[in-house]
Image: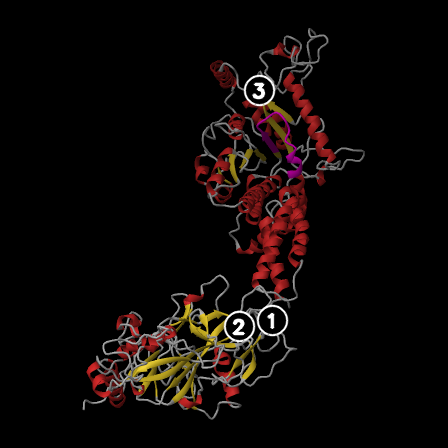
Amino acid sequence: MALPVSIGAFLQSEIIEDPLYKDEGVCVLGIFGKSAMQPGSPKESLLNTLADKHIFSLFGLGDTDNQESGAVIQAYYNQESRVLYLVLTSVFDNRQLLKACETLCAGVGHAEAHEFWKGAEKQHCMQLLYLFSLCHVLLLIHPTCSFDVTYDKLFRALDALRQKVLPLLRATLKDSPVSKEWKMNCRPCPPRLLFVFQMNGTLRVSGPGSGNGADGCGGNSDRPKKHSPRRRLQHALEDQIYRIFRKSRVLTNQSSNCLFTVPANQAFVYVVPGPDEDPVGALLTQLRSNCALRENDTGTPAPGPRRYNQMRHSSRQPSFNVENTNLSSGGQLVDCTLKEFLWQHVELVLTKKGFDDSVGRNPQPSHFELPTYSRWAQVAYRLHQVMMTNTEEEMAEIAIKVQAQLKVLEGFLDAEAKFSENRCQKALPLAHSAYQSNLPHNYTTTVHKNQLAQALRVYSQHARGIAFQRYAMQLHEDCYKFWSNGHQLCEERSLTDQHCVHKFHLLPKPGEKPELDHNPPIMQHNSRGRSSSACNCGRKQSPREDPFDIQAANYDFYQMLEEKCCGKLERIQFPVFQASTPDPAPASDDTSRTPEPAPPAGEEEEGEHLKEKEGAVSHTPGDSTGLSLALSLGQSTDSLGPYGDGTEGPEKRPSVVDRQHSTVEYLPGMLHSGCSKGLLPKFSSWSLVKLGPAKSYNPHTGLEQPGFLPGSNFLLPWDVVIRCRTEEDVGAVEPLDGSSSSWPAPNKALSGKRGGAGYLWRGRRRDDVARAFVGFEYEDSRGRRFLSSAPDKVVKVLGPGGAKEPATRALNSDMPLYVPSPSQGRGVKPHFAQLARLFIVVPDAPLELTLSPQVQPGLPPCPVFHPEQPEVVLAPDSMWVLRFPYAYVTDRGPCYPPKENQPLASYRVLRGILRANTASPPPQ
């Protein structure tokens, strides 16, 4: 073969052997080791020297440059010398190491990089075991002149791996054309291992006499030494290597039980001298020796294994056998060459003498077989299929089992991982204890994450190495299993932002009873929070559980009290969903956004009629709501805000009739400004109840209902102008008789002491002004109720006569949805009172009040909630109470009450909740 090729391609190729050598045996020589940071690899250059041919290039591996990173075995067969060279290059060589580094990307973590390198080492071990199973002689190349003790660990790992895979290799070779001993031991013989070291500048030998002073022993320096410093170094290395391997039991007395052998009476260490100082002279000397070889060559090769003697130099005889005769002029033995050192061992193989390396009292002879190339190739191909690359299905199962045995190498080669495993295993119980310290029996996800973070901090203080991430993930899993195994608290939060106190459980289905013994248990949510609330009309208070769904909060509780208190009162029913199918479905976002057909003609006419009526009431300049309300407040119509004149402002108010309501899909939450038109909920979260006629309220005693703080149960008066008359009419009708009705003089306004806007019309006739009453009621969780006269003021009446402060400020402002309760508890956490009801007394006068509540229960972009009927006209001579929802829920979830650090002004009831509609009498 002209060039070396990979072992896989070599075994699959057909080699045409010379008929003269076809039946002769072949010696298999394996070469492996490490290389230093130098341009040329010493293994390839030494092989060129041994074969006397330029086989490998000095700066590249030829076709092996295209190979992937990892271990690669190159084969070269020299038929003339009957030697087959197998050269192993791995990540311990410069070229393969650079390729491996290029394959690693920059973002690879420490554990992934360690796994990559250990995988490369395992692949290198498998390739080495392949060489140890096929070679007669193995040559270990090392770039320095000191022994690397890591080879002891490597060889022990290889021996353990060989013992594991030996039964599998026997099954592979059972049909091979080799001897029974080969099939039993899975190798032609116990291979002999030789060591070649490189001189790295420690010793410099310039001539035969240079060893006189290089000994370093002092004493008689003029006395010549028998051995050169290089040979003495070789002997010292032999003694060191043999002693190390015997101590670790890599070498034993019986060579057949060992991974490899070393000769007992022959040298097995060679130190390659360093480069000559005169490279030109060295090349000329090498040229002369080659020319001398060609001149002495007879031209007729001798048959048999002794033909390699003709290739030797006549002046170079092995100095190991003629140490006493081959002396220099100074009496010092001449060192042999590398080829002479190696060929004495190859000669034992080619002459079929074998290796007798067993020692002890009863040495057992080891088996030896010199195969022909064809037989060796068959065995090598079978082993290649199961140990390296499998391409045959019949050996796939054995190959998988062989690869599974690589885990035996971890204990020998991966000391870092073993140390990391021990450290992480010791840190794991400490982390578990840190996680479980000060834990309640049931806890939420937040507590779990906090405890897990504390456990990871403790773990990171003790754990080290590449197993850190793996055991950290195990800590995550262990803590999660502990939490989910009976310690997980229900994550559901009530509509008042309180957690359920039960452990993880399931909700009962409709008609299903709770089952506490079920796993997980079936029960209702409970936050152990109780509050007191009044019914729709406010006449009866009752304790209530903390609600977890909108129906329990805004409908079920009030329906239960309605049966006991206000069930017979007159009310205005807000429209709700009316199903036309037996199984209606909640509307989704996609379906609810699609437009629906226009309403029928009858309903459209009714809507137009209502719009015309509304326009006639609110858009007449002299009779508009804005004018009457402005006159009653003593202000201009510009100060009424966007709803003063009945027109639409920046926040668009919903129309009375926009489209036909759906009877197939219902709104799952509450109605607000972000909902699609035409959808209604199954129940209304609002309630509008009539308590009786206007005389049901006594302004001197206030509301006679339970729970009110003393003096805070009085409604605020609201004087609304019914008819405006000119001053000429006043003078014609009212005589100036000095009475109180004609005082002061014309063109003078009556100014009261209070200066309030409600007293501008005190000198008018009583039928010009109608007095209504309005009250914004707030209620806290303890059932304490009070009325508010302004966003930051509580009604407080100390004497008789009722409330004196008018309702104009409250009606002209955005009333807060939550205010601090006047009676705070002893705790640090403040208590808030929520707007619960709006009391309205419509006087017995030609006056109609339009109710249009709009609530924004949160920071923008929180939507604006309103009843299912956005505007309701309240008839004269009636007392009404509007009950606001207890909780507000959108399709994205509930709007929780404000926290301590949140501004209360963002939770508000928009101004314009009441509008007065009056009509002027016809001219007389």
Q: How crowded is the residue under tag 2: few (<14 C-alpha within 10 Å), some, or many (20+)? A: many
Q: Which of the two discs, 1 and 3, sits closer to the camera?
A: 1
Residue 335 in picture, x, y percent from top left? 62, 18
Give the residue pinned by disc 2.
494
Give the residue pinned by disc 1.
501
Whether residue 656 is visible here, answered yes or no, is: no
**Residue 192 among those drawn in magenta:** no
Residue 869 in picture, x, y percent from top left? 36, 83
Residue at 64%, 35% in the rendered image: 151
711 displayed left or right of 344: left
Residue 816 in picture, x, y percent from top left? 43, 70
- What residue type is disc 3 on? Gly
- Write the start and end of the magenta stretch as one range: 138-154
Q: Is residue 769 above or below residue 102?
A: below
**Residue 141 among those drawn in magenta:** yes
510 displayed left or right of 157: left
